[in-house]
Amino acid sequence: MIKKEMIAMLLAGGQGSRLGILTSKVAKPAVSFGGKYRIIDFPLSNCINSGVDTVGVLTQYRPLRLNTHIGIGIPWDLDRNMGGVTVLPPYEKSNNSEWYTGTANAIYQNIEYMETFNPDYVLILSGDHIYKMDYEVMLDYHKSNQAEITIAAMPVPIEEARRFGILITDENRQITEFEEKPEKPRSNLASMGIYIFNWKSLKESLMAMADQPNLDFGKHIIPYLFNKGGRCFAYEFNSYWKDVGTLHSYWEANMELIDIVPDFNLYEEYWKIYTRSETLPPQYISGDSIVERSIIGEGTYVYGKVYNSVIGCNITIGKDTVVRDSIIMNNTQIGEGCDITKAIIAEDVVIGNNVTLGTGDEVPNETDPSIYTNGIVTVGEHSNVPDRVSIGKNSVVSGKLTEKDFENNALGSGKTLIKAGDEL
């Protein structure tokens, strides 16, 4: 039997519905980030940089792009005979076919996979956070406390604390109380959804709680272990960590990358972020174009002006087009004479000539006012936006649009235009 000290289980099956149209056709961990990366690259890179060489990636919702991206794990040096990366979708069993119904249920359904490595410890990760963490340091902390579970936690503003699992600890950071999303939080130490379990404790807890509907770590497994008197410790993390779960936090995290001295540096030699890259020609910036404070991906041609933006790979920005405060994802073509302000444009989009995005006043979105906010215009992937169209703030468009879809060539602020076949 293979023996691994610690293996990682990376939960990457979530839809990420608060990202709206960006995740209508792709799982949240597969969404582009920072130009050439995808969100899942960050926890995967953390694993290999921390010496964790066995990772099970649990997929479920729209897994195709994620599976293609991960492949056999070559970019992360995870193409190993012993361990490496394994994609673990839900599968049909002889008596029933069962989807993953909760974070812990997904892990429970893969007990067999974990057992093949006979690990001492299991690291549970989420596939949709942007951060750099050395899991080996966390493991040393776990061992030194002789803990059964160690939960990575960080201080958050007290007014945001009720969105998280909240930990109350003693002076040794041993957890004395755990509250899942409390109405009135008594601490601001929030669980980051990163756990190290002793394998025996994890297996026993999963078996004991297996019949709970929507089996979840925060609601079931951690309280079970805690109530049993298990040694539970908080590992405090004080570096950059971003949950890019909303369109605005996703936009913000991308914009933070282009600060003069970014809080989160993508280019540190000693902690590289790895990704699957296509072989593309270098960037081309024409003689009369302007690029300021922006990331420009490989294979991208800029003929216009780009300010404070994150531009992916294999993109064309036409002559006399101005792009400001925007995120443009891979394989997108933008015509000439466009004016694009605070937009998120997904992959494989074609924008015609003389198109204006982000015009007018801010008005709440008519269908999803909590998703499409902060003046951002969102364009879903594989969309076409015809020539001479103007689209207002807090609007979302998706699909193969034609001039007939717009009244007087305009779509006002706060509007939703999703063509049939392009589900929300």
Image: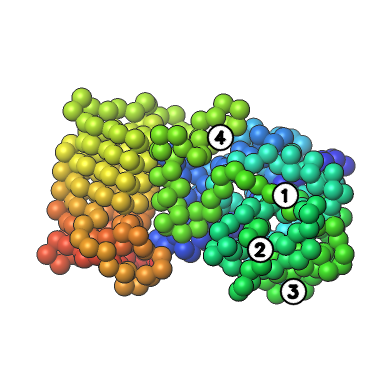
Q: CA distance from mark 1 to mark 4?
A: 26 Å
Q: Nearer the viewer, residue 187 or 289?
A: 187
For the residue marked with disc 4, what is the amino acid? Tyr
The residue to which callout 2 is attached is 187
Left or right? Give the position of 373 relative to 214: left
Residue identified by numbered label 4: 274
For label 3, the SS is loop
Q: Which residue is identified by label 1? A: 235
Q: Nearer the viewer, mark 4 or mark 2?
A: 2
284 w.r.t. 119: above or below:
above
Q: Which numbered disc, 1 or 4, marks the residue that appears first in the sequence?
A: 1
Q: Callout 4: few (<14), some (14-19), or many (20+) C-alpha neighbours within 10 Å?
A: many
Q: Is residue 134 above or below residue 97?
A: above
**Which mark is first along the chain, 2 or 4?**
2
Q: Is residue 274 above or below residue 9?
A: above
The residue nearer to you, when weighing 89 against 209, is 209
On screen, residue 257 versus residue 113, left or right, reads left
Locate residue 155, reporting x and y percent: 62, 54
Neighbourhood count class around disc 1 (C-alpha, 10 Å): few under 14, some 14–19, many 20 upward: many
